Amino acid sequence: MEDDCRPLLSSEQTGESLSHRGSTDSLDFKAKRPFYVEPRNIVGDDPQERVSAEAAILNSRVHYYSRLTGSSDRLLCPPNHVIPRPEEIYIYSPLGTAFKVTGGDPSSKNPSIITIFAIWNTMMGTSILSIPWGIKQAGFTLGILILIFTGLLMLYCCYIVLKSPKAIPYMDTSDWEFPDVCRYYFGKFGQWSSLVFSMVSLIGAMVVYWVLMSNFLYNTGQFIYNYAHNVNVSDSTFGTNGSDRVICPYPNTDPGGNLTLSTLYLSNSGNDTSDVSTFQHWWSKTNTIPLYLIILLLPLLCFRSASFFARFTFLGTISVVYLIVLVTVKAVRLGFHLEFHWFDTTQLYVPEFRLLFPQFTGVLTLAFFIHNCIITLMKSNKHQENNVRDLSVAYLLVGLTYLYVGVLIFAAFPSPPLSKDCIEPNFLDNFPSSDVMVFVARTFLLFQMITVYPLLGYLVRVQMMGQIFGNHYPSFFHVLVLNIVIVGSGVLMSKFYPNIGSIIRFSGATCGLALVFVFPSVVHMISQKRQGLLRWPSVLFHSFLILLGVANMVAQFFM
């Protein structure tokens, strides 16, 4: 009986290894297509249309040919030009009926402009808030050069990832993602290591989200309380005067940290000082707000499906567009404040070249990171021959957006009277909670992150539970334990180390080491070697990329 289920033409007879065939049986796309019945073989127009005897014979013939070879072999796969259009596909039932495929086409294609902005919107995350801080850490001139150089490297590595499934011969890789490619080349080690580093990027992003949500919720509540109780907050000594106030929350902090206390002077014209102190006790950015978020977000993480939250992804585009408008308005009102000191630090300005630049490369590695989902995004592109062009345009738009925000905030930061070293890892912290435009930006970002956070948790659960238990939702207890670990890490970081710049750079350098530099470069060299196209310039260049990834990771521990 076991032999009856085995294909008559196995992969071993065609020269393929059994391990390769077994790793892709579940990924074959054409083997899962619905059975096609010609319209003339459909009897009647009923919702459940009977199938003629001729169509039934054709169905038996198709099943016979499918037995001749394994599902991962292309030896007897029908070519694409004979596959009917989706509206002509019927699903054949063994009971002798055929059901026409109705509803929207799940494989509908998008024009290039939609694909480009989908990549732009996906890549635009919390890292945009840390770009001005990264430029400050690297120096203005060096920061701009590093941003351009890192963007080009990330684009090339993303191009390798996009092309990697098509370089695998004799297999249907239409449903493959990059972890599947790593599994093909490196076996279980590649599969599990790519999963681990993917988890680092996702959980790192969730920790950053928790820190930022605590920040935005605190400042939003502070704005509402001050407005309702006529509380005026003045930052005498550490802020500028005028309608567009800029503050330096941590004036005594060295360039690598931001964990000193801010000095605020409160003047209360409506309530007692004790009421303000009580509010500050229960509304603390690090002590209470991270705990309040548990009540809202932990139940949302336990939802079996995240489709409800996917409807609010448009908030991300609105938030980024509003941030660009906010940066433009602030830069026009504040003007530019620049002085060029190439290597010497002054009281108010940072040098153009600083040894802290690896902090910026770590941030940019995560800021340009889309390698773990680029294959899926590009599958929806209507013109597949333009994938490389559209990917390049998307990276260009992302790089220009980062440059625009980073350069304007750095240049417009008022020095004097404040030092450029006061630029925070979240540049919105350089504006007081009483700023109306910044309040709107924080509110937008807060609601966006509340809807995106469960989506990130869903991705973590699907990848981790699917690999370990073979089920995306093994039980409520398993999911609850995983969510408690994720939420607990966010709460601890929000309380003891709320520096999103450092969190972003460490998670970016860690996941980038494997998924951006090492795996794509090694996969590319192995593929070239098997095709007989590997040359020593390619070996040197891709080995250099691997060394850059290792250096980027190691340097984060010395900054």
Image (cartoon, rainbow, N blue to C red):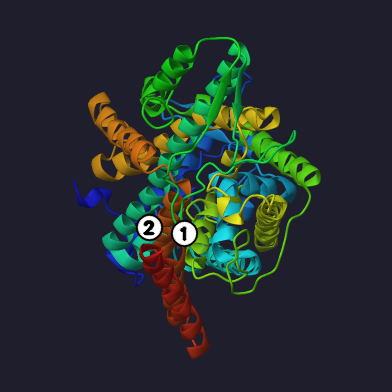
- Name the image quarter holding the C terminus: bottom left
Q: Please state the horizontal and vertical placement of residue 350, each as a whole percent of the image.
A: 60, 63
* Dot placed on the residue nearer the N-terminal end, 2 or 1: 2
Visible in this render: residue 104?
no
Question: Does 96 sit above or below residue 319?
Answer: above
x 40%, y 41%: residue: 207
For label 2, count other residues whose C-alpha is less than 10 Å away and answer few (under 14), some (14-19) or many (20+): many
x 34%, y 40%: residue: 496
x 40%, y 35%: residue: 457
Q: Please state the horizontal and vertical placement of residue 325, each as a whole percent of the image.
A: 75, 40
Visible in this render: residue 97?
yes
SS for callout 2: loop
Q: Which residue is mark 1?
A: 76
Residue 438 is left or right of residue 185, and the answer is right
Mark 2: amino acid: Thr
For label 1, count other residues whose C-alpha is less than 10 Å away and answer few (under 14), some (14-19) or many (20+): few
Task: Between residue 109 and residue 546, name the one nearer to us.
Answer: 546
Q: Residue lying farthest top?
A: 271
Q: Residue lying farthest bottom?
A: 536
Mark 1: amino acid: Leu
Question: Does 456 sit above or below residue 415?
Answer: above
Residue 471 found in image quarter: top left
Task: Between residue 516 and residue 97, name the one nearer to us.
Answer: 516
SS for callout 1: loop
Q: Which residue is mark 2?
A: 69
For the residues labelled 2 and 1, the Cα–Cα distance comes to 7 Å
Residue 409 is left or right of residue 445, and the answer is right
Residue 192 found in image quarter: bottom left
Label 2–label 1 contact, CB within 8 A: yes
Q: Please state the horizontal and vertical placement of residue 211, each as a whole percent of the image.
A: 44, 37
